[in-house]
Image (cartoon, rainbow, N blue to C red):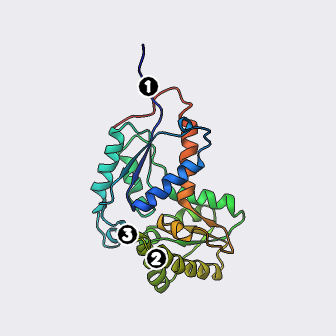
Amino acid sequence: MNDAVTPLPRLGVLGGMGPLATADFLVKLIRATPAASDQEHMPVIVHNVPQVPDRSTAFLAGSDAPWPHLLDGLRTLEAAGCSAIAIPCNTAHVWHARLANVTALPVLHIGEAGVDALLKQSVGARRGGILATSATLQARIYHDQLAIHGIAALTPDDALQGTHVSAAIGAVKGGRIEEARMLLAHAARALIAQGADALLLACTEIPVALAGVSLDVPAIDPTDALARACVGWWLEARSEPAPLHTQL
């Protein structure tokens, strides 16, 4: 009798940044998967370790403190046999290129997924508003992706960024969702008033807070877009005959 289990590609989730955002990503991943039974969902291994130093604080201070934690998480997922990596944290994508360079696994990019979703949901958009951490904005994680498609980036001014966007992100991390919702709704409407044709909710805490809020333009959830990109990877990868996992 052969008790061997046929290996399937496994998605590795480099999470914990923060824990609620990781849980939100997993729900969106499951909902985006075309499955009629438990067995048709993709295998997922989650590295949900919240002790990674704050990505935005580190980047703005010129610190590389998150890097060894991110690398350790990546190596843990490699050792677990994962075939691709998703990082449900926008600001952690400051280190995306370095992570991609030290692994043979594909590391999906939330910025690319988010802008692809914007192009589909807001055809002809010329100005994309970005709600994100200050580090994500300064690192141009979305600016450069938008520029490739000729879309101008609109961002909050420094005052609004601090009193509303950054404060709201902190409120979500502290479990104060209603407080965050009011702050972010105001910031979103300010960008729309500046002429934004669509909004990118480009911090994984922001879609959590703005769930159910009605806005006048498409509001793109890059967390959901990343989940859908992972599903696309899974549907393609599971049909490939050869094992995908290769560890450096």
Residue 149: % across, % down? 63, 62
* Earlier sequence position, callout 1 versus callout 2: 1
In the image, farthest residue toward the right: 124
Residue furthest top in the image = 1
Disc 2 target residue:
168
- Look at the picture and state if 12 lies above or below 226: above
**Residue appearing at x 42%, y 16% in the figure:** 2
**Looking at numbered disc 3 in the image, what kind of residue is underneath it?**
Ser
Q: Residue at x 45, y 33 (%)?
A: 244
- Return the residue at label 1: 5
- Category of crowding for the residue at label 2, using alpha-carbon neighbours closer than 10 angstroms: few (below 14), some (14–19), many (at least 20): many
**Which residue is label 3 attached to?**
56
6 in relation to 131, above or below: above
Between marks 1 and 3 in the image, the one whose residue lies nearer the viewer: 1
Quadrant housing residue 115:
bottom right
Is the C-beta separation of discs 2 and 3 under 8 Å?
no
Nearer-N-terminus badge (2/3): 3
Residue at 40 percent across and 69 percent down: it is 173
- Where does the image place residue 118, in percent across and percent down from the top left? 63, 62
Provide residue 17's location: percent of width, then percent of height. Answer: 39, 61
Res. 106 mark: none
**Could you say whether the residue bearing mark 3 is in a helix, strand or loop?**
helix
Question: Quick one: 121 or 213, which is closer to the camera?
Answer: 213
Classed neighbour count for the residue bearing mark 3: other residues with Cα under 10 Å, few (<14), some (14–19), many (≥20): many
Q: Secondary structure at mark 2?
A: helix
| Residue 129 seen from this side | yes
Identify residue type, mark 2.
Answer: Ala
Query: Of 167 and 3, which appears nearest the observer?
Result: 3
Q: Quadrant of residue 155?
A: bottom right
Helix or strand or loop: what does disc 1 sit on?
loop
What is the quadrant of residue 236 in the picture?
A: top right
